[in-house]
Image: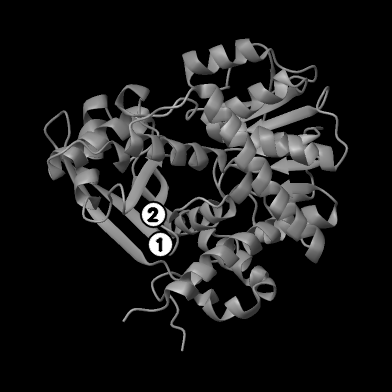
């Protein structure tokens, strides 16, 4: 008898509710492995921790932290850590589950995990941020490790955060453990090419998708939501391929230029101001107008749940590339499919980051490091090969790329679960 997760009551469009619906849709394609499907609906381990720190003014502040290990059947947990005011256990559960699927989709020897702290890092000083990161790392130290669970950067975290996490874990275990996190500074065992790897993966899968729908990237109009590492890197690559970035949106505002932005100027503006808002090379528009922009390619690279059913009816793009995790709710997915819009799902589209994280982990263990050109060649080969397997599955069953990605990934996860069996 299957027991529900009594402490979570997801709605269909919530992150965990979205994930559960995605799993349900793949069951008909799992064959004899369907008997194990409930495994995918029950995270293996969930840790909630109190993160108390002393603020610069002497106050004691408490933050709530999470680390969820969704499935470890194929290897140690792997997934990022985000610092955001809206972080919840349910969100982290879904993100960890999507990491299980993503890692299996590109056939990396990892399970899925994710972490986060509910906080607004913009309100913390650098010292407060360091103290919070180190305390959080100490609290989750009982379940992470180079062969157990390897965190990485996510929303509002970066190589410096990873350096503090690595140092804290190393101090607590008594030896330097570079492999406990990925996305570190290169000087501490980080990999070349890691910062732009997720955006590069979005571009590579988008380039393959464009070929499938006969979309010429030269002159293609691109709209990007979220202009951090992922969105900006993908935008740069599409621009280099001849595309015009005509719209951009982030937490600072939404801008539009029918002739395409000067990317060098826009990226310089974002680096100096922290966002696209106020950029002189584009016109201001309100947030909802972004979804009405006439474009060929839409890249949601911000947070989950952005493409709702109502917005899906307005999207003018021929192709949606999910740079973010879970940006399209299931009802919107159905509408886009009915309208003939190709959606390259997050669990393959943005897998470039975790793929290069895998390269970093391997390099740390061997103490032998590759050039950035070697990294990019290996990344492109893995992404293109994984996408081909997924597309073949989609064509064979006449299903969407998302369901096909889940079919390939869940088969791998549940095969490992079945072969390992249950203990005791």
Left or right: residue 122 versus residue 32 is left
> Which quadrant of the figure contains the C terminus?
bottom left
User: For the residue labelled by badge 1, is the local secondary structure a helix, a strand or a loop?
Assistant: loop
Q: Of callouts 2 and 1, which one flags the residue occurring earlier in the amino acid sequence?
A: 1
Q: Quadrant of residue 224?
A: top right
The residue sitting at 75% across, 18% down in the picture is 260
The residue sitting at 66% across, 77% down in the picture is 31
The residue sitting at 85% across, 52% down in the picture is 339
| Disc 2/disc 1 C-alpha distance (Å) | 6 Å
Q: Position of residue 161 (x, y in %)?
A: 32, 32
* 7 vs 214, nearest the viewer: 214
Residue 227 visible in the current orientation: no
Residue extending farthest to the right is 214
Left or right: residue 252 versus residue 188 is right
Left or right: residue 329 versus residue 80 is right
Q: Is disc 1 surrounded by few (<14), some (14 to 19) or many (20+) residues within 10 Å? A: many
Label number found at residue 5? none
Q: Position of residue 169 (x, y in %)?
A: 21, 42
Instruction: Tell whether label 1 touches label 2 (CB within 8 Å).
Output: yes
User: For the residue labelled by badge 2, is the local secondary structure a helix, a strand or a loop?
Assistant: strand
When the figure is inspected, residue 408 is found, relative to residue 351, above or below; the finding is below
Label number found at residue 77? 2
Q: Quadrant of residue 221?
A: top right
Question: Which residue in the protein does label 1 denote?
Answer: 72
Residue extending farthest to the bottom is 1
Q: Position of residue 242 (x, y in %)?
A: 78, 20
Q: Position of residue 418 (x, y in %)?
A: 49, 75
């Amino acid at each position: 008898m299957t027991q529900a997760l009594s402490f979570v009551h997801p709605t269909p469009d919530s992150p965990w509710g979205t994930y559960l619906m995605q799993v349900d849709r793949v069951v008909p394609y799992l064959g004899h492995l369907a008997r194990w499907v409930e495994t995918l609906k029950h995270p293996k381990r969930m840790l909630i921790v109190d993160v108390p720190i002393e603020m610069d003014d002497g106050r004691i502040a408490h933050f709530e932290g999470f680390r969820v290990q969704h499935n470890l059947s194929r290897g140690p947990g792997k997934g990022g850590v985000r610092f955001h005011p809206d972080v919840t256990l349910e969100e982290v559960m879904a993100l960890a589950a999507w990491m299980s699927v993503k890692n299996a989709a590109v056939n990396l020897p990892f399970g899925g995990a994710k972490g986060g702290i509910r906080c607004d890092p913009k309100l913390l000083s650098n010292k407060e941020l360091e103290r919070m990161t180190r305390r959080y790392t100490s609290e989750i130290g009982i379940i992470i490790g180079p062969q157990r669970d390897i965190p990485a950067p996510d929303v509002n975290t970066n190589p410096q955060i990873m350096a503090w996490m690595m140092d804290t874990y190393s101090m607590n275990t008594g030896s330097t453990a570079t492999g406990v996190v990925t996305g570190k500074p290169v000087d501490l065992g980080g990999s070349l090419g890691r910062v732009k790897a997720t955006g590069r993966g979005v571009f590579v899968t988008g380039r393959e998708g464009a070929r499938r729908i006969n979309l010429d990237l030269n002159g293609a109009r691109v709209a990007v939501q979220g202009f951090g590492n992922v969105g900006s890197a993908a935008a740069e690559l599409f621009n280099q391929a001849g595309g015009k970035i005509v719209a951009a949106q982030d937490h600072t505002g939404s801008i539009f230029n029918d002739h395409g932005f000067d990317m060098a100027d826009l990226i310089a503006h974002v680096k100096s101001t922290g966002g696209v808002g106020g950029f002189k090379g584009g016109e201001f528009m309100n947030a909802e107008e972004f979804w009405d922009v006439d474009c060929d390619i839409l890249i949601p690279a911000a947070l989950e749940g952005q493409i709702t059913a109502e917005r899906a009816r307005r999207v003018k793009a021929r192709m949606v590339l999910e740079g973010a995790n879970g940006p399209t709710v299931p009802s919107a997915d159905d509408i886009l499919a009915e309208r003939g819009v190709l959606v390259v799902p997050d669990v393959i589209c943005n897998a470039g980051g975790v793929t290069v994280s895998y390269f970093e982990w391997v390099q740390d263990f061997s103490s032998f490091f590759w050039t950035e050109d070697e990294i990019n060649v290996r990344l492109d080969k893995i992404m293109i090969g994984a996408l081909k397997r997924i597309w073949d599955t989609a064509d064979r069953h006449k299903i969407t790329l998302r369901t096909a990605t889940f079919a390939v990934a869940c088969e791998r996860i549940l095969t490992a679960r079945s072969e390992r069996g249950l203990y005791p």
